[in-house]
Amino acid sequence: MTNEELWKAVLGEMELSLSRATFITWFKNTVIIARDRNSVVVSVPNGFIKEWLENKFNKKILQSIRTLSPEVREVKYAVGRPKPETLKHDISKVILEKELEEKSTPADDQDIDSVTNLNKRYSFESFIVGSNNELAHAASQGVTKSPGRMYNPLFLYGGVGLGKTHLLHAIGNKLFSENRARRVLYTSAERFTVDIVEAIRNKTIEEFKNNCSKLDLLMIDDIQFIAAKEKTQEIVFSVFNELYGKNKQIILSSDRPPQAIAALEERLRSRFQGGMIADIGIPDYETRLAILRAKCNLKNQSFEDDVLSYIATHIQKNVREIEGALNRVIAFSQIYNRVPDVKEVKNILNAYLTTPYRKTSPQTILKSVADFYSISINDLLKRSRKKEVVKPRQIAMFLLREETKLSFPEIGQKLGGRDHSTVIHACEKIRGESAGDEPLKQELVLIKERVYNSLDR
Ligand code: ADP
Ligand code: MG
């Protein structure tokens, strides 16, 4: 039986037990990429799906495989590149595809250490220091000089794509490379939550806590996700106290300062505030330019100053987007085998800035939905279960998912701190219903018109 046949059989079986929408959500673009006597490797499009398959579906998948291939003991999931389609003539599509390809592999698996979860790509050497991140950088370096002593916990906060995750990994990499015996763990709050839920279900939560308490360095990224998750907060609290009491270093990152994380227990908030808090802001023009130069060096690319300065002038708020723009320009130069001039860069970035993903913002979507249904944005965010707000809220979640690049948890956060499972449910529901329901389909079209024609975006 070929890999393809085997996987097709598994998918057939999975499809029977799931709704169509769920099935598509989790199994689209999955494929067996390797197989030996005892194990099978399945390629999946992104880390989120990998996590879900590992945690929710692995048992079923394995069972299903074993009915056909009983010697298989294990299924592994790897984030893989979707195969680029045959070359299109539309240059902006080609560039977009190339870019998506890079995005879907934010870190190659071989860059990530399987024990510490550290990504080798993120180092202090590749981090550009500017006035926006000076303090966060200095504090991070301080931690590497005397872990557990100087700044404990270290709490870094700032907007999306400004380098928090980069700094966390840089600290971890430095400390781990200095001393390989150090027990270092990088995790995201989302991942941590999933692990905790899993450990509770498997009755291994004491073991889990025990393992955490043996760490020398624990880093939890995007800690704001534990808001409103009581059990997770309880475990974080207990692990925090264990480690802190032994002068072991704890580092947290968040998109906002501790006092602004709603639905966080007071005892945790006060602990998060008890060490060093440093924010990261938006880089100024010089820093943006320096970051671009550094990324070019890393990728062995060189462009005229006016090209880089065009990017630095037009993309300001998010280093990840700056990198995305640079990647587009690099894609262009690879496809055409020459360096673009400023005029071409302008065209490339125009297309970049006006792809559907770029055209809108979460705020615009919320406002458009609220306006359309004559309710307030606040109605969308608050807890009310009234029929008049529940449906608009689900539609808002669905559109945020379709029209922006926000993840399910980020969408939950934007809609008043809801759980990502609520968002997933809403998106599936609206997607499913809109397939058959003409009025709903029509409504979605009208709301999208508002979204893309609104002036305040
Ligand atoms: P955050 O975690 O704050 O959302 P990341 O750490 O993921 O942001 O950063 C997004 C991208 O921008 C990463 O590829 C990172 O390497 C890059 N980046 C951010 N700040 C800097 C910087 N000061 N120097 C170099 N690269 C940076
Ligand atoms: Mg991050």
Image (spheres, helix red, strand yellow):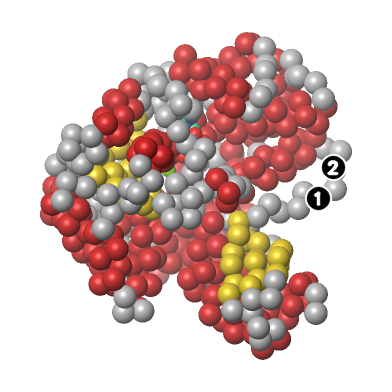
**Crowdedness of circle 2 by 10 Å Cα count: few (<14), some, many (20+)?**
few
Residue type at mark 2: give it. Answer: Lys
Please say if 5 is above or below 186: below
* Mark 2, residue position: 88
Q: How many marks?
A: 2
In this picture, residue 347 sits left or right of residue 121: right
* Mark 1, residue position: 85
User: Tag on residue 381?
Assistant: none
**Crowdedness of circle 1 by 10 Å Cα count: few (<14), some, many (20+)?**
few
For this rendering, which residue is in front, 12 or 71? 71
Q: Residue furthest bottom?
A: 67
Q: Quadrant of the N terminus?
A: bottom right
Q: CA distance from mark 1 to mark 2?
A: 8 Å
Please say if 447 is above or below 57: above
Please say if 184 is above or below 282: below
x then y, percent, for residue 294: 54, 22
